[in-house]
Amino acid sequence: MANRQAKATRRVPAGWRHVEKGVHQLTRIEAEARDRVRKLRKEARAQLAVLRGHQHEARRVLRRLSTAVDGSWSDLKGTAPRALDDARGVADSMIARFRRAVSE
């Protein structure tokens, strides 16, 4: 029986070393995972900053286009009645000429 205890006692330190080695390995894996998460978050923040920059630029371009379109639309609304008046004037003068030509 004493022999059995001696063998068991020798196995215990070996078992503990094995467990300690596993714990050390898990600690190292956790540290690597934390480092990787930290790097991924940093990269995500950088990409988000780039996307926000693109978004800001797109808003600025849309604002300029909107202003240009509004200006063009108001110009078009202002010139359309004048163009129609000019066309009516030309049409009226042509009708008058045709009437004169037909009545002569």
Image (tube, grey):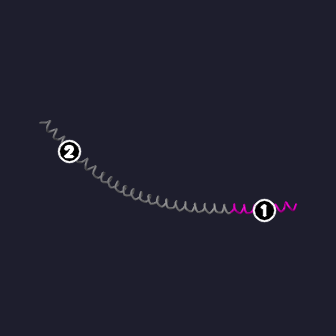
Magenta-tinted stretch: 1-23
For residue 90, the mark is 2
Q: Position of residue 77 (x, y in %)?
A: 31, 51
Q: Where is residue 22 in the image (x, y as percent from the top left)?
A: 69, 60
Q: In which quarter of the image is the C terminus?
A: top left
Q: Position of residue 62 (x, y in %)?
A: 39, 56
In the image, residue 53 sits, relative to residue 83, either above or below, namely: below
For residue 68, the mark is none
Q: Quadrant of residue 30?
A: bottom right
Task: Identify the residue shown where x is 34% and y is 55%.
Answer: 68
Task: Identify the residue shown where x is 15% and y is 40%.
Answer: 97
User: Is residue 16 magenta-colored?
Assistant: yes
- Three-letter amino acid code at disc 2? Val
* Element marked by disc 1: helix
- Three-letter amino acid code at disc 1? Val
Q: Quadrant of the N terminus?
A: bottom right
Mark 1 is surrounded, within 10 Å at the Cα level, by few (under 14), some (14 to 19) or many (20 or more) other residues, namely: few
Task: Identify the residue shown where x is 25% and y is 48%.
Answer: 83
Task: Identify the residue shown where x is 69% and y is 62%.
Answer: 21
In the picture provided, is 47 more to the left or to the right than 101? right
Farthest residue, direction left: 104
Q: Quadrant of residue 53?
A: bottom left
In this view, the residue in front, 39 or 23, is: 23
User: Is residue 38 magenta-colored?
Assistant: no
State whether the magenta stretch is mostly helix, strand or loop.
helix
In this view, the residue in front, 52 or 27, is: 27
In the picture provided, is 62 more to the left or to the right than 6? left
In the image, residue 92 sits, relative to residue 45, either above or below, namely: above
Which residue was labeled with disc 1? Answer: 12
Mark 2 is surrounded, within 10 Å at the Cα level, by few (under 14), some (14 to 19) or many (20 or more) other residues, namely: few
Q: In which quarter of the image is residue 32?
A: bottom right
